[in-house]
Structures are given as C-alpha cells and as structure tokens.
Image: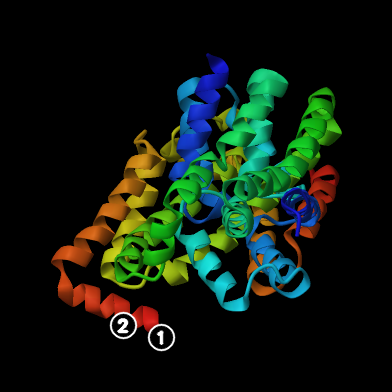
Amino acid sequence: MLLLTLFLMFAKIALFNFGGGFAMIPLIASEMDKFQWLTSQEFMDIIAISQMTPGAIAVNTATYVGYSVAGIWGAVVSTIAIPFPSLILVITLYPILDKYKNHPVLKMIFYGLRPVVAGLIIAAVYFVAKTAMINQDYVGESIITIISNFFTSINFGSLALTVVAFIIALKTKISPVILLLAGAILGILIF
Amino acid sequence: MNRKYILLNLFFTFFRIGLFTLGGGYVMVPLIEREMVNKKKWIAEDEIVDIIAITQSIPGALATNMSALVGYRIAKVKGAIVSVLGVILPSFIIIVLIAMFFTQFKDLEVVQDSFLGIRSVVAGLIAAASIRILKKAAVDIYTSTIVVATVVLLILTDIEPVFIIIGGLVFGLLTYFFFPKLKRKVLEKEKK
C-alpha cells in the first residue's frame, strides 16, 4: 500500500511538473506535509544531495525520498514513477505531440504556465531558506513572529551564504556543484 | 543494424549520459543532442530540433522526456523504455548508496553544520534560477499578477500546488480562445 501511494504521488508530481526540478520542490513539500514522512529539513538535505550527484534532480529526489520512506523498494517505485507519465504520453500520443509541437495553442498554454512555474520556484526559495536561516527556537513560528524578532530569529551566517551564492550564481558561470561544496566547507567553519 | 544491438547501444549510451551529467536536465539536453546527432548520427539535425520542442512541452523531467523521445524515434516503444531506464539507473544506484550511508552520519555535528551551509547555498542557487525564469515568465501585468498570486498562495495557504498549475494552464487556454487581442500580442512577442 505504501509503495502504491509513493508511486502515485511521484507520478502525479511528474505529470504536473513543468520547468524542471526546482519547480517540483513545492509539490513534494506539499505532499510531505500531508503524509508527515520527512521533516522539511530532511527533505531539503535530500534536495541538496540530489543537486550534487549526477542525473536529473527530479529523479534523484524521488529515489532518495522513496528510499527514506520505504527502503529499497520505495526507491524503485519512486524512481520509475518520475518518467512514467511522459513515457506513456510519448508511446501513445507521439504522432499528436509531433504535429502540435509548434502550435500557437501550446505557446499560449505556456504563456499561462510559465508565471506559475516562476512562482513555484520563488516559493521553493522560501521553503529552503526556512530550513537554513531560521534559528532553532523559532522553527514553526509564524512569519510575523519571525520578522518581529528578526535579530534573534535569523541565522545571519546562513543569510550571508545565501546572498553570496545568489550573486555568484547570477553573475558568473561557476558550477553549482562547486558552490555547494564551498557551502559545505564554510558551513563547518562558521556554524 | 541488428535490433538487439540498437537497444543495448541505446541503453548504454543513456546510462553513460545519466552517469556523467552533473547539474540536472538542462545540462543533459545539449549532451544528448551532440551524442545522437554528431557522434552516432542516429537522428538528423532538424529532427532533434523537433524532439527538443516536444521535450519542453510535455510534463516531467527534461532528461527522461528527451530520452523517451529519442529512444522512441530510433526504436519505438522498446527504444523509449530502454533509454529511460538507462538514464535513470545511474541516479538510482548512486542515490541509494548515498542514502544508505548518509543515515549513519547525518547526526554528526560536522555533517549537520556542512548541510546547514549547503542548504543556505541551495536557497541562493534557486533564487538565481527564479530570477532567470522570471524574466521570461512575467512579461506583462497578467503574468506578473499570476507570479505574485502563486507565491502568496503557496506560502500562506495549504492549497495543493497542482491546482495552481492547472489554473495557469487554463488561463493560457482561455487567452487563446477568448482574448484574441492579448493572444496576438503574446504570439508576436514570442516570435522575436
């Protein structure tokens, strides 16, 4: 039963995943809230590891979450669930997909979808930052409490790392993997 | 060429691509393109352009979408299946190995500290990615409103993200069918 739940959950996430692995984060986070399988910090560590290892972030994340929830078979069904919807789509509807790939209706659908994907990715920043920047005593407090106690609730070392990583990622072509490794080393040094 | 040979070759080609690409699907698309068009010459140049267009328009991870499409073009259903299995298998093996070991070390203080640093960097990386897509997504007052509404709904309510995604899709469709003026404007902009 747990395996079936995992499979359906990741197949659903894949079916609604446009715009890459980051846009998937709020979708999985919402499911994790529902099932309470992982804490949000555990989930974000998984996202981090998924970015540092080879392969698609979506597949890596699914494998890891599946393994954490239900061991090796959980990993198997979750991994297969990610390509499953698009595989079925390609196998059954290839001629139609091929015919309509440049159709204006598709362009208009993405005109509507792209801002949602942007919103999902911005929300993902919030979800990840919450597990890094907020000091232990304030975890689970409301945004208002956190903001009104800004100086004690925020971990400024973490905030600084985020800002520096943001600027470097935006302005240079340095590989994210190198930035993540630098983050690991700086984390040991400053925290 | 022998069919079995083609399937095996597809499997190992995608396995290698899955094993050696760091950084997710975006990195894989040009890699698969080079492998299939220039090296193996299994797919013509104008065909790969079509495949990339479909890859981006169907849901799911870019890497697995593209593997499925390339595999299907070359060897139909079996080709699609072996290509997808090839590209996900390295991830599976590596992640399971890490997951097995990480659980034993994750409570060590040094590991906790390094992951706090890593999570901080991840937030910065995703923020940078969001700026890049924001430039392409928030092109007018309507789409900018959708971005803000999406963020507010996701952070402040328990709404299922799936419904917001369906909302965006429906908005695009409605524009196509009922708002010809806006539609023309958007399509003209896309051409540039």
Seen from the viewer's position, the closer of residues B72 and A164 is B72
Q: Which residue is mark 2?
A: B188
The residue drawn where x is 44% and y is 39% is: A143
In the displayed structure, A68 sits above or below B5; it is: above
Q: Chain of mark 1?
A: B
State the residue at coordinates (64%, 64%).
B29
- Mark 2, Cα crowd under 10 Å, few <14 / some 14-19 / many 20+, is few
Task: Tell me the quadrant of the picture where the C terminus of chain B can be found.
Answer: bottom left
**Circle 1: residue type:** Lys
Please name whichever residue, A173 or A100, is drawn nearer the observer in this view of the structure: A100
Q: How is the image coloured?
A: rainbow
Q: Residue at x 24, y 59 (%)?
A: B173
Q: Is residue B109 above or below residue B127?
A: above
Asked which secondary structure carries label 1, the reply is loop
Disc 1: which residue: B192
Quarter of the rendering containing residue A160: bottom right
Q: Quadrant of residue B46?
A: bottom right
Q: How many marks?
A: 2
Q: Residue B69: horizontal and vertical position, in percent?
A: 57, 56
Type of amino acid under label 2: Glu
Residue A76 appears at what percent x and percent y? 67, 28
* Quadrant of the image occupied by residue B174: bottom left
Whether residue B77 can be seen here: yes
What x and y, as percent, mark residue B175?
21, 64
